[in-house]
Image: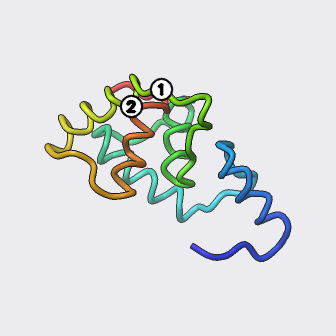
Amino acid sequence: GHKPGNENEWQNLMRINNGYWPSQVSQTAEDKAKQDFKKIFNRSPDINNGSDKHAIKILAYDIRQRPEQRSLGRERTAIANFKKIFKHLPSNSTEWKFIRVLAYSGVKN
């Protein structure tokens, strides 16, 4: 929600851009991600579960797969699952972030 103000913040931005978790966390972003997780999976995340934790990081920081790690098959399946959950196709950046969570977090519906 703000421009990087120092070298550490720039490094975190680069980590996120390259598909890695940031070294600093935003509690506000992670709290919002937990609410989004509930919308998608109809349950609270278990932070002790690696897949749930991964989903929270994707949601909180909009982490994307590196191009060499993308799978169109997984993304097609995620779009179908999204449509079952929300009764429409994704139409904005938040909903496409939900697609990435469904495709790559490892959380099972």
Q: Name the residue at 42% across, 48% down.
A: 97
Horizontal arrangement in the rendering, residue 76 relative to residue 12 (left or right): left
The disc placed on residue 75 is 2
The amino acid at mark 2 is: Glu
List x then y, in percent, for residue 29: 53, 61
Dividing the image into 4 quarters, which one contains the C terminus? Answer: top left
- The CA distance from mark 2 to mark 1 is 6 Å
Q: What's the residue at 83%, 63% (across, down)?
A: 8
Q: x%, y% of residue 57?
A: 56, 46
Residue matched to label 1: 71
Secondary structure beneath disc 1? loop
Classify residue 46 as left or right of residue 38: right
Depth order, front residue of 49/2: 2
Residue 7 occupies which quadrant of the picture?
Answer: bottom right
Kind of residue at disc 1: Ser
Q: Nearer the viewer, residue 70 or 10?
A: 70
| Residues at marks 2 and 1 touching, judged by CB atoms closer than 8 Å | yes
Q: How many marks?
A: 2
Above or below residue 19? Residue 28 is below
Extreme residue in the right direction? 7
- Mark 2 residue element: helix
